[in-house]
Structure formats: structure tokens, C-alpha cells
Amino acid sequence: MDTPILDFLRAYAVSGTSRLHIPAHKGRGELGCEAMDITEISGADDLAQPSGILLESERSAAGIFGAGQTCYLTGGSSQGIKAMLHLAALQRRGVILAGRNAHKAFFHACALLDLPVRWLYGENLCSCRVTPASLEEAIAASPEPLAAVYVTSPDYLGNVLDIASLAELAHRYSLPLLVDNAHGSYLTIYGRHPIALGADLCCDSAHKTLTALTGGAYLHMKTPDPRAREAISIYGTSSPSYLILASLDGCNRALREFSAQSAGAFAARLADLAAALPFPNRSEEPWKITLDCAPIGASGSEVAQRLRHFSAEPEFADEDFVVLMLSPRNTEEDLQRILSALGDYPVRPPRAPLLAPVPGEQVLSLREAMLAPRENVAVSRAAGRICASAAISCPPAIPLVVPGERISPEAAAQMAARGIAEIGVISSQ
């Protein structure tokens, strides 16, 4: 069967079976999807120990992505990030060498698992251009034993790392490469998925660039790991949404039907659109347009408001960038609205972009800081205090200041500039 989960749910929805099981809506409700919202009934399999339709669908996905094992997630890549780090910690203890532009779920996982981190730094909040040369330098400079290398690619702005070269280098030092590929599940269509390029563990958010419902994600492993199910279950619910699972099942069919030719045509259409706008497009992804506002003297927040005036909602905007995430399910009307809103945007003298603040002194470990007594203070009074919780503007949920660091005046100023009013700090009492 091409979509075994969907087939089962559709059959059950019209079977007339009396639902003497949870959920309590009994297949009836205001949303219209309740008939296919079930739990682990007979025949529906069990995500924690799949042996039927869920396992069949996961194996189908693994074949599409070229993975040794693929596990479905209903808690997004946040769940996948935690499971990846859990599996890495089971393999060996040591320092995680990580790009600084990590999602907040990375910080949560390191605190829970008490994993020390050595940072690789980038040029702005969202980007961290890890190269083979910079990675090898960091590996050689580490005074402590390393456990794994962790990077984000594509990042929130659409920058794509040379995963093949990074994997080769990490493996030369007997280190696994873990990739947060939350934004790049569709790259498998172009043969550019991290697993195909040599990554050992990789998580994808299928709801970001494929057709899954929100929360649908994958954990891919180059080599099957019998401990993966347990690691996943620690960080997720014991009652996974079958609506999300069915949508992941549907992604398999969509990926098989989506040809490289049509993918190329869509990417070419977006490239033409980006070229017609006065903004430099900084995205290296085929399905993302990242408008760089500083070179034409624009404000990202004003550009986002202009889009909204034309009934178009961007994915993300700060003072420097506006991110437009697109897929083949966007219509030509959607694309024309972007052109109508921004095609004649006024070009002014360039301005200096916001740079990533210099990291403060690491006073406490992530675990010590995130589990310590804390208090909230205004960012205007935060300089000099020790950060207790990740200071983020969401999206993209990338911390400006890492828990355990002393907050610098520059970091406090950037938090204010990005609309962060308060931050948790270690209590002074």
C-alpha cells in the first residue's frame, strides 16, 4: 500500500464502529477531521513499538530519504533534536561541538542531558558558516574530548553548509555529524539531503517544507539504532496524533510524485521572482527567498508590513531580513502579491546590519543555569547578570544569549532592538 496509515484511518472513519476508546469526541466535532483522529486501537499500530502500518510507512520514508532508519515524530524537529543528542550521548560522553545558531531545543536537550558545549560562531543571529577548515581548527583546539559535531543546515536565512565535506572531516576524527535539517526535508528531491551527503543523524520538519501537518517531523539515521524508539519516546507524548502521522504518510506519496523536473521549474520560477525584487536574495535554498534589507536602506519590519498590506504574511522579519518560505502549493496569485508589494520598493542609501553580539563569559554550564533559581529583569537592567533562560525572538527561536553566560551590554542592546523586553537571570537572592 502506498499510504497505509491514511488507508486505515479512512476505512475506520466510515466503518460505523462504536468508539469505546479515547478520544472523547468519538469521531464527531466542529473541526471536521475528528473521524480520522484516533488512538492506538487494534490495527492502528503503536508508534513506540511499530510493527504494522506505522512501520511500513516509516520504511517507505526511509527508502525515499536514503536512510538506514527513519522514525516519525509528532513533536516537530524539537523532539528530533533532543532524541539526536540523546543517542549521541549514549554513544559516548564528551563535548558537543555546535554551531551557535542552534534552536532553543538544542539548549534544552543539553541542559537535560548535562552535555557540555563548545561553540562555533557565526556572523549574525541566524547564520553560522561552519566550513571544513573552521571545523578542523575547532576540533584541534578543543582541550576536552569531543562527542559529536552538531550543525544547522539550512539555517533560518537559507544558508546551506557543505555537509558532505563536514561529514567526511568529522568521520576522520571518529565523530558523528548531527544535522538540524528542520527547514530542508524537501532537499531530498534535489539529492541534497544531509543523510545522502553523509550525516549520521538528521531531523527534518516535514511540516515546514513538505505537506505534513504542524508537528510532523522525521528522525533519520544513517545506521539503524535499536535505542532510537526509546530516545524519541522520552521527549514526546505517549498519545501521538494520528492526524499528524497520516499527513507524514501522505508526504511519501507526494515526494514520489514530485518529479525533479517540476521541482526545477518551481525553483526557477522563484529565482525569477527574487531577481525582479530590489532586495538581494541571500537564500541558497531553492524554495526560500531571504530579502536582505540593509543594502537598500530598508527596515525588515516595514517590509513585512508592506507585504501584509497586500494580504501576504511572511515567515519571519527582523530589522535586517524578511524570510519568505514557499512551496509548490503556493499559487501564482501568491507570487504576484509579492511582486506587487515589493517590486517597486524604494531603494535608499545602505545601512549597517545588526551583527551577532560578542558572546559573554560562560560562568555556569547550561544545566546549572537552566535549573538554578531565577528572576525576570528588564533587558535594560540585564547587562552584567548571568543568563538563566534562552533569550529568543520567536521565530527563529535562536538564543541571543546562552544560559550560563554573563550578559554583555551589546547583547542587552540587541535584545531590546529585537523586541525582547525581559530575560530570566540567575537570582541575586
Image (cartoon, rainbow, N blue to C red):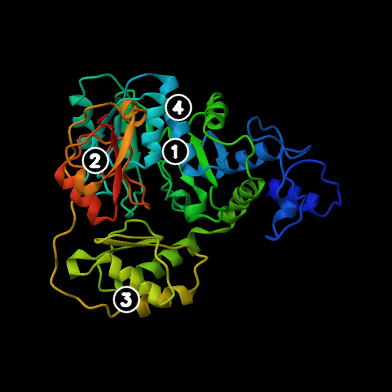
**Disc 3 or disc 2, which is closer to the eye?**
3
**For numbered disc 2, what is the local secondary structure?**
loop
Task: Give the mark, 2 or 4, whose residue is nearer the N terminus.
Answer: 4
Secondary element under disc 3, as helix, strand or loop, is helix
Q: Amino acid at mark 2?
A: Thr
- Residue neighbourhood size for the residue with mark 2, other residues' Cα within 10 Å, grouped as few (<14), some (14–19), many (≥20): some
Gap in angstroms between the C-alphas marked 3 and 2: 34 Å
User: Are the two marked residues, 1 and 4, in contact with CB atoms closer than 8 angstroms?
Assistant: no
Q: Quadrant of residue 46?
A: top right
Mark 3, other Cα within 10 Å: few <14 / some 14–19 / many ≥20: some
Q: Residue at x 24, y 50 (%)?
A: 415
The residue indicated by pointer 2 is 131
Residue 402: percent from the left, percent from the top?
28, 37
Q: Are marks 3 and 2 in contact (CB under 8 Å)?
A: no
Residue 163 is situated, as x and y percent measured from the top left of the image, at 34, 41
Identify residue for label 3.
Answer: 342
Q: Amino acid at mark 1?
A: Cys
Q: CA distance from mark 2 to mark 4?
A: 25 Å
Callout 4: SS: helix
Nearer the N terminus, badge 2 or badge 1? 2
Residue 289 x/y as whole percent: 35, 63
N-terminal of the two: label 3 or label 1?
1
Label 2 or label 1, whichever lies nearer to me, is 1
List the residue tagged with mark 4.
Answer: 86
How packed is label 4: few (under 14 Cα within 10 Å), some, or many (20 or more)? many
Between marks 1 and 4, how big is the CA–CA gap?
A: 13 Å
Q: Which residue type carries mark 3? A: Leu
